[in-house]
Amino acid sequence: MVSDTLDCLVIGAGPAGLTAAIYLARYRRRFVVVDGGEPRAALIPTSHNLAGFPEGIRGTVLLERMAAQARRYGAPVVGGTVTSLTRDGDGLFLAETSAGQIAARTVLLATGVVDRHPEVPGLRGAIGQGLIRYCAVCDGYEAIGRRVGVLGQGSSGLGEARFLRTYSANLTLLSWGVPLGLSQDERKQVDAAGIVPVEEPVASITVGANEVRLRATGGGDLRFEVVYVEMGSSPRSDLVRPLGTRLEKQGCVIADGHQRTSTDGLFAAGDVVSSLDQISVAMGEAAIAATAIHNRLR
C-alpha cells in the first residue's frame, strides 16, 4: 500500500475519519485512510439534527458525499483492516493491515463503537424503517406522541426512558433476558416520570410492517411504534491497548482538548472517544485533531 513513512495514518472512514481526511488533504499532508467498511453512521435512516440539512440526510448518502469531498483534494481512502499497531525504536507507528505494513509519524484513531443489541430477525431493515433506534439524542424528536418501548438489560434503559419522556407520554421500560429489577430509588424515578415498567424479561422481538412486538417470558405481546435499544456499546479501541493508551472503564479512549491521547503521537476522534456520540461532535473533534497533527508535524 505505502512503502515509505506517512505523516499520518487515519483508521476509520466514518464522519470523523473522513472529516480528518478533508483537513489533512487541504493541509497537504501525506496520509492514508484505512476503511474497515462498517461505519456506524451507515445505519442511520435519516439524520435530522445535522446542521445544513433541513430535510435530513441518510447516513450512507452523507458518507458518500464526505468521501467524494475528500477525494476531490486527493485524499487516499482505501479498504482494509488494521490488525495491529506498534511503535519502532524511532517512535514511528507501524500498522499491520490486510494490505501490508504502514509506517506513520502520527495516527488518528476514528474507529467508532459497535452497538450491543439482541438477536432480531430483520434487525437492519427495522433500523432502516426507524422502528428500532439507538439514540434518543439523535431522533427523539421523531418519536413525539408515539408508543415507545425502551429495551435495556435490567434497569440500564432507565436513563434513556427518562430522556424520551420529553417527547412521549406513552413510554414502557423493558429488559432483555433478565428481570427489570428496579431499585427503590429507580422505582420512584419511573413513577415520577409516568413510565410503565415491565418486570418480566423480554424473550423475543418480532418486527412487523409498522410496529415492533416484544413478548415477555410469561407470554403476551407488547406492541410499539418505536423501540429504543439501550444495551450499551463496545468501543473499537483494542488496537491501542497494547500501546498502553489510557482508556475509560467502558473502553473509550481518553483525549485532551486537542484530541491527543496519553500515547505520544496518537490522536482520537469520534465515538471511540469519551464524549457525546454525535456526527457533529465527531466532525468537530476530527477538525481539531487534524489541525493538531498538522501543527505537530510542521
Image (cartoon, rainbow, N blue to C red):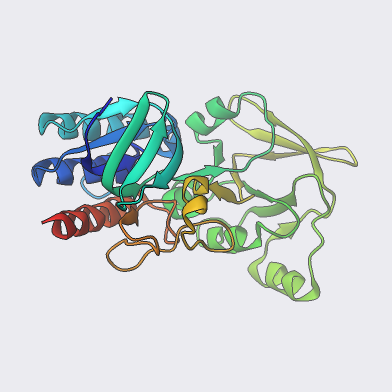
Q: Position of residue 161 (x, y in %)?
A: 61, 58
- Name the quadrant of the C terminus: bottom left
Q: Nearer the viewer, residue 283 or 8?
A: 8
Q: Is residue 58 visible?
A: no
Identify which residue is drawn at 42% across, 25% down. 98
- Snapshot quadrant of residue 192: bottom right
- Snapshot quadrant of residue 78: top left
Furthest residue toward right = 218
Q: Nearer the viewer, residue 202 or 198?
A: 202
Q: Is residue 146 visible?
A: yes
Identify which residue is drawn at 76% across, 56% down. 154
Identify which residue is drawn at 54% across, 58% down. 164
Residue 95 in the figure: left or right of residue 133: left
Q: Position of residue 120 (x, y in %)?
A: 67, 30
Q: Position of residue 259 (x, y in %)?
A: 31, 61
Q: Relative to 61, say whether 271 is above or below.
A: below
Residue 38 in the figure: left or right of residue 23: right
Q: Relative to 130, say whether 197 is above or below.
A: below
- Name the quadrant of the N terminus: top left
Residue 69 in the figure: left or right of residue 45: left
Q: Position of residue 44 (x, y in %)?
A: 42, 36
Identify which residue is drawn at 79% across, 70% down. 183
How many numbered marks appear?
0
Residue 135 in the figure: left or right of residue 23: right
